[in-house]
Image (tube, grey):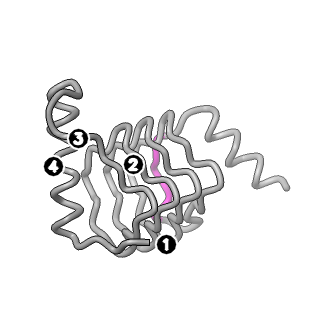
Amino acid sequence: MKQLTQKEINDIIIKHEIWLDDNNHEGSSTNLSNMNLSHSNLSHSDLIGSNLNHSNLSYSDLSCSDLRGSNLSYSNLSCSCLNHCDFRDTDLDFSCWPLWCGGLNVKIDDRLAIQLLFHTIL
């Protein structure tokens, strides 16, 4: 699992935002799968449709980020700050969801809400 520097992460996010702003013609979609992003600052990032599956995001700050339609399956989000993130239509299957105050005030869709509730009754 490759560890990226904060500068490398910022450069990737800028390219992704250009890709989003130009209706997917310029720049590139973010692919951060299988990356070690632990302790990274990704707050206020526009990561719509990005690929973060199998990534280590533990202890990262994702607060106020837009992750709609992203793939976060099998990702480690433990101890991450997710306050005010938008996870609607996001694949979080088999990921580790933080169970502390940093996981409050997130936007989720019905499918994810049911999935999270299901695990509380097991």
Report if the CB atoms under discs 4 and 1 are less than 8 Å apart. no
| Residue 25 left/right relative to 77 | left
Residue under pointer 3: 28
Earlier in the chain: of badge 3 and badge 1, it is 3
Q: Position of residue 64 (x, y in %)?
A: 31, 51
| Cα–Cα span, label 3 and label 1 | 29 Å
Residue under pointer 2: 85
| Cα–Cα span, label 4 and label 1 | 25 Å
Residue under pointer 1: 79
Q: Residue at x 52, y 60 (%)?
A: 54
Q: Residue at x 31, y 70 (%)?
A: 40
What amino acid type is highlighted by mark number 4?
Ile
| Residue 116 left/right relative to 85 | right
Image: 41 above or below 39 = above
Q: Position of residue 110 (x, y in %)?
A: 61, 32
Mark count:
4
Report if the CB atoms under discs 3 and 1 are less than 8 Å apart. no
Q: Which residues are magenta?
A: 102-107
User: Which residue is more in the foreground, 29 or 115?
Assistant: 29
| Cα–Cα span, label 3 and label 2 | 22 Å
| Cα–Cα span, label 2 and label 4 | 18 Å
What amino acid type is highlighted by mark number 1?
Cys
Earlier in the chain: of badge 2 and badge 4, it is 4
| Cα–Cα span, label 3 and label 4 | 9 Å
What amino acid type is highlighted by mark number 2?
Cys
- Mark 3 is surrounded, within 10 Å at the Cα level, by few (under 14), some (14 to 19) or many (20 or more) other residues, namely some
Q: Position of residue 30 (x, y in %)?
A: 30, 47
Residue under pointer 4: 14
| Cα–Cα span, label 2 and label 1 | 15 Å
Image: 61 above or below 21 = below
Q: Position of residue 1 (x, y in %)?
A: 44, 72
**SS of the residue at dot 4?**
helix
